Amino acid sequence: MNALLSLLASIPSSAVEIPKAEINNAQLQGAISVILAVAGVVAVIFIILGGLRYTISQGNPQDLEKGKNMIIYALVGLFFVMFAFLIVQFISGEIF
């Protein structure tokens, strides 16, 4: 083990170059926007599914509660997605 450590220590630092990822601000903002858009679409789908579950529950209290909870959780998730989008837009300087 000591031999391996001494071998690694003998390698000059200029011989080991770590390539740097070249990501510009537009690419990063585009990727974040796509992720947030997908999350928003998923939240809307869950709102629709919760509404369907609530509607077809036929008065069953457990199914009514499940549908209502699904709608509430999806709305909370959608709120967080919209808030994250506003933060990204504010940081990138495209808003305000």
Image (cartoon, rainbow, N blue to C red):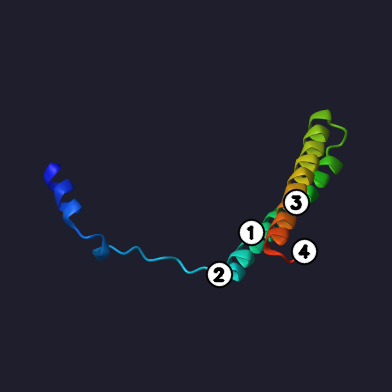
Circle 1: residue type: Ile
What numbered label is drawn on residue 83?
Answer: 3
Whole-angstrom CA distance, mark 3 to mark 2, is 23 Å
Whole-angstrom CA distance, mark 4 to mark 3, is 13 Å
Question: In the rendered view, would you say 16 is above or below 72?
Answer: below
Residue hosting label 1: 35
Residue hosting label 2: 24
At 73% across and 47% down in the image, what residue appears? 80
Circle 2: residue type: Asn
Check whether the beta carbons of the residues at disc 3 and disc 2 lie within 8 A of each other: no
Closer to viewer: mark 1 or mark 4: 4
Whole-angstrom CA distance, mark 4 to mark 2, is 19 Å
Question: In the rendered view, would you say 83 is above or below 94?
Answer: above
Label 1: element kind: helix
Residue 45 seen in render:
no
Q: Position of residue 2 (x, y in %)?
A: 14, 42
What numbered label is drawn on residue 95?
Answer: 4
Question: Which quadrant would residue 63 be assigned to in this image?
Answer: top right
Circle 4: residue type: Ile
Label count reads 4
Upstream in the sequence, badge 1 or badge 4?
1
Q: Position of residue 56 (x, y in %)?
A: 84, 42
At 86% across and 36% down in the image, what residue appears? 58
At 77% across and 43% down in the image, what residue appears? 76
Q: Is residue 8 left or right of residue 41?
A: left
